[in-house]
Image (cartoon, rainbow, N blue to C red):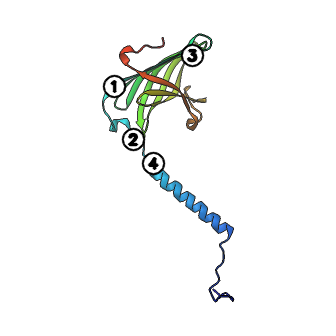
Amino acid sequence: MEPNETNNMPRTEKPSRGAVWLLVIVAVLIAILVSTSKMKQVTPVAEVSQDSQMLCYYSSTPTASGFNDVYSLKLSTDGTTVTGELATAPAEKDKMNGTLDGVLISNGEEVLFSGTYANSAEGMDTIDQKMIKLTENNAMIGYGEMKLEADGSYSYANPDQIDYSLSLPRVDCASYTSAF
Protein backbone atom coordinates (compact mmCIF):
# COMPACT_ATOMS: atom_id res chain seq x y z
CA MET A 1 0.00 0.00 0.00
CA GLU A 2 1.14 3.46 -0.74
CA PRO A 3 1.25 6.08 2.04
CA ASN A 4 -1.42 8.77 2.05
CA GLU A 5 0.17 12.17 1.23
CA THR A 6 -1.54 14.08 4.06
CA ASN A 7 -0.76 11.84 7.05
CA ASN A 8 1.70 9.19 5.86
CA MET A 9 -0.79 6.42 6.77
CA PRO A 10 -1.27 3.51 4.37
CA ARG A 11 -4.20 4.06 2.04
CA THR A 12 -7.10 1.62 2.47
CA GLU A 13 -9.60 0.91 -0.26
CA LYS A 14 -13.32 0.47 0.39
CA PRO A 15 -14.66 -2.97 -0.44
CA SER A 16 -16.78 -3.09 -3.57
CA ARG A 17 -20.55 -3.42 -3.27
CA GLY A 18 -20.30 -6.91 -4.72
CA ALA A 19 -17.91 -7.95 -1.96
CA VAL A 20 -20.23 -6.51 0.71
CA TRP A 21 -23.21 -8.39 -0.72
CA LEU A 22 -21.18 -11.57 -0.88
CA LEU A 23 -20.33 -11.20 2.82
CA VAL A 24 -24.00 -10.59 3.67
CA ILE A 25 -25.09 -13.66 1.69
CA VAL A 26 -22.43 -15.84 3.34
CA ALA A 27 -23.47 -14.57 6.79
CA VAL A 28 -27.16 -15.35 6.08
CA LEU A 29 -26.32 -18.84 4.81
CA ILE A 30 -24.24 -19.55 7.90
CA ALA A 31 -27.10 -18.35 10.12
CA ILE A 32 -29.56 -20.63 8.28
CA LEU A 33 -27.24 -23.62 8.57
CA VAL A 34 -26.70 -23.05 12.28
CA SER A 35 -30.43 -22.67 13.00
CA THR A 36 -31.47 -25.74 10.97
CA SER A 37 -28.75 -27.88 12.51
CA LYS A 38 -30.26 -27.09 15.94
CA MET A 39 -33.73 -28.29 14.90
CA LYS A 40 -34.93 -31.45 16.59
CA GLN A 41 -34.85 -34.58 14.50
CA VAL A 42 -38.16 -36.39 13.89
CA THR A 43 -38.32 -39.45 16.12
CA PRO A 44 -40.99 -42.11 16.38
CA VAL A 45 -43.34 -41.83 19.34
CA ALA A 46 -42.27 -45.36 20.29
CA GLU A 47 -39.03 -43.85 21.62
CA VAL A 48 -41.16 -41.68 23.90
CA SER A 49 -43.81 -44.20 24.99
CA GLN A 50 -44.59 -47.82 24.15
CA ASP A 51 -47.94 -47.60 25.98
CA SER A 52 -51.13 -48.53 24.19
CA GLN A 53 -53.83 -45.93 24.56
CA MET A 54 -57.21 -44.85 23.26
CA LEU A 55 -57.59 -41.20 22.18
CA CYS A 56 -61.01 -39.68 21.48
CA TYR A 57 -61.98 -36.30 20.03
CA TYR A 58 -65.41 -34.86 19.36
CA SER A 59 -66.95 -31.60 18.21
CA SER A 60 -70.55 -30.53 17.59
CA THR A 61 -70.83 -26.88 16.60
CA PRO A 62 -74.13 -25.10 15.84
CA THR A 63 -74.27 -23.23 12.55
CA ALA A 64 -76.29 -20.18 11.49
CA SER A 65 -78.74 -22.50 9.71
CA GLY A 66 -79.69 -24.18 13.00
CA PHE A 67 -77.90 -27.44 12.21
CA ASN A 68 -74.63 -28.70 13.71
CA ASP A 69 -71.23 -29.47 12.20
CA VAL A 70 -70.33 -32.79 13.87
CA TYR A 71 -66.89 -34.41 13.83
CA SER A 72 -65.60 -37.42 15.76
CA LEU A 73 -62.21 -39.12 15.87
CA LYS A 74 -61.16 -42.22 17.78
CA LEU A 75 -57.57 -43.46 17.68
CA SER A 76 -56.13 -46.63 19.17
CA THR A 77 -52.35 -46.53 19.52
CA ASP A 78 -49.93 -49.37 20.12
CA GLY A 79 -46.50 -47.74 20.20
CA THR A 80 -46.26 -45.94 16.88
CA THR A 81 -48.95 -48.03 15.14
CA VAL A 82 -52.38 -46.41 14.98
CA THR A 83 -55.83 -47.51 13.87
CA GLY A 84 -59.02 -45.55 14.26
CA GLU A 85 -62.22 -44.04 12.97
CA LEU A 86 -62.95 -40.59 11.60
CA ALA A 87 -66.49 -39.35 10.96
CA THR A 88 -67.33 -35.92 9.56
CA ALA A 89 -70.82 -34.51 9.18
CA PRO A 90 -70.72 -30.83 8.26
CA ALA A 91 -74.15 -29.19 8.39
CA GLU A 92 -76.14 -29.45 5.17
CA LYS A 93 -73.33 -31.32 3.38
CA ASP A 94 -72.57 -34.97 2.73
CA LYS A 95 -71.22 -36.94 5.65
CA MET A 96 -68.07 -39.04 5.42
CA ASN A 97 -66.88 -41.82 7.66
CA GLY A 98 -64.14 -44.36 7.55
CA THR A 99 -61.16 -46.03 9.14
CA LEU A 100 -57.64 -44.75 9.73
CA ASP A 101 -54.45 -46.79 9.58
CA GLY A 102 -51.00 -45.32 10.07
CA VAL A 103 -48.21 -44.33 12.40
CA LEU A 104 -47.42 -41.60 14.91
CA ILE A 105 -44.29 -39.51 14.56
CA SER A 106 -43.02 -36.81 16.90
CA ASN A 107 -40.58 -33.95 16.48
CA GLY A 108 -40.45 -33.28 20.21
CA GLU A 109 -43.01 -30.47 20.03
CA GLU A 110 -45.97 -32.12 18.35
CA VAL A 111 -47.22 -35.57 17.47
CA LEU A 112 -48.47 -36.25 13.96
CA PHE A 113 -50.64 -39.09 12.70
CA SER A 114 -49.60 -40.02 9.17
CA GLY A 115 -51.52 -42.67 7.30
CA THR A 116 -54.49 -43.58 5.18
CA TYR A 117 -58.20 -42.90 5.52
CA ALA A 118 -60.41 -45.55 3.88
CA ASN A 119 -63.73 -43.73 3.69
CA SER A 120 -67.16 -43.71 2.19
CA ALA A 121 -69.03 -40.62 1.03
CA GLU A 122 -71.82 -40.11 -1.46
CA GLY A 123 -71.88 -43.85 -2.19
CA MET A 124 -68.20 -43.89 -3.20
CA ASP A 125 -65.35 -45.61 -1.39
CA THR A 126 -61.91 -43.99 -1.53
CA ILE A 127 -58.56 -44.18 0.19
CA ASP A 128 -57.01 -40.84 1.07
CA GLN A 129 -53.75 -39.85 2.67
CA LYS A 130 -54.53 -38.29 6.06
CA MET A 131 -52.39 -36.16 8.39
CA ILE A 132 -53.60 -35.20 11.87
CA LYS A 133 -51.69 -33.10 14.40
CA LEU A 134 -52.24 -34.25 17.96
CA THR A 135 -51.71 -32.16 21.08
CA GLU A 136 -52.54 -32.96 24.67
CA ASN A 137 -56.02 -31.44 24.27
CA ASN A 138 -56.81 -31.32 20.52
CA ALA A 139 -56.63 -33.13 17.21
CA MET A 140 -56.17 -30.90 14.16
CA ILE A 141 -57.34 -32.63 10.99
CA GLY A 142 -55.24 -31.88 7.92
CA TYR A 143 -57.03 -30.81 4.75
CA GLY A 144 -55.58 -29.77 1.42
CA GLU A 145 -55.68 -30.20 -2.31
CA MET A 146 -55.59 -33.89 -3.22
CA LYS A 147 -54.19 -35.62 -6.29
CA LEU A 148 -55.13 -38.99 -7.74
CA GLU A 149 -52.36 -41.59 -7.59
CA ALA A 150 -51.81 -44.43 -10.10
CA ASP A 151 -53.24 -46.98 -7.62
CA GLY A 152 -56.52 -45.03 -7.34
CA SER A 153 -55.81 -43.54 -3.92
CA TYR A 154 -55.49 -39.83 -3.19
CA SER A 155 -52.57 -37.99 -1.60
CA TYR A 156 -51.90 -34.39 -0.66
CA ALA A 157 -50.83 -32.45 -3.76
CA ASN A 158 -48.82 -29.98 -1.64
CA PRO A 159 -47.89 -31.54 1.74
CA ASP A 160 -46.29 -28.28 2.89
CA GLN A 161 -49.62 -26.46 2.42
CA ILE A 162 -51.87 -28.66 4.55
CA ASP A 163 -54.48 -26.66 6.50
CA TYR A 164 -54.88 -27.84 10.11
CA SER A 165 -57.58 -25.33 11.08
CA LEU A 166 -60.24 -27.95 11.93
CA SER A 167 -59.56 -28.63 15.61
CA LEU A 168 -61.43 -31.24 17.65
CA PRO A 169 -61.21 -31.14 21.46
CA ARG A 170 -60.15 -34.30 23.27
CA VAL A 171 -62.93 -36.03 25.20
CA ASP A 172 -63.09 -38.88 27.67
CA CYS A 173 -63.45 -42.05 25.62
CA ALA A 174 -66.09 -43.35 28.07
CA SER A 175 -68.33 -40.46 26.97
CA TYR A 176 -67.25 -40.65 23.33
CA THR A 177 -70.08 -40.51 20.80
CA SER A 178 -69.41 -41.17 17.16
CA ALA A 179 -70.89 -38.72 14.69
CA PHE A 180 -72.92 -41.66 13.29
Q: Nearer the viewer, mark 2 or mark 4?
A: 4
* Residue drawn 42% across the image and 27% down it: 137
* Residue drawn 42% across the image and 42% down it: 42
Looking at the rendered structure, which numbered label has been put on residue 43?
2
User: Dot 3 surroundings within 10 Å: few (below 14), some, or many (20 or more)?
Assistant: some
Side of 34 where 14 appears, left or right: right
Mark found first going from the N terminus, 3 or 4: 4
Observer able to see residue 36: yes
Tell me the SS state at disc 3: loop
Looking at the rendered structure, which numbered label has been put on residue 90?
3
Looking at the rendered structure, which numbered label has been put on residue 39?
4
* Residue drawn 45% across the image and 48% down it: 39
User: Depth check: 104 or 4 in front?
Assistant: 4
Tell me the SS state at disc 4: loop
Observer able to see residue 73: no
Residue pointed to by mark 1:
53
Side of 107 where 165 appears, left or right: right
The residue under label 1 is which amino acid type? Answer: Gln
Q: Quadrant of residue 136?
A: top left
The residue under label 3 is which amino acid type? Answer: Pro
Query: Distance of mark 1 from mark 4, alpha carbons?
Result: 28 Å
Query: Distance of mark 3 from mark 2, alpha carbons?
Result: 34 Å
Mark found first going from the N terminus, 1 or 4: 4
Q: Is residue 162 above or below residue 31?
A: above
Location of residue 96 in the rendering, given as x and y in whole percent from the top left corner:
54, 16
Question: Residues at badges 3 and 4 in contact (C-beta under 8 Å)?
Answer: no
Q: Quadrant of residue 159?
A: top right
Q: Nearer the viewer, mark 3 or mark 2?
A: 3
Query: Distance of mark 3 from mark 4, alpha carbons?
Result: 38 Å
The N terminus - image quarter: bottom right
The residue under label 4 is which amino acid type? Answer: Met
Question: Residues at badges 3 and 2 in contact (C-beta under 8 Å)?
Answer: no
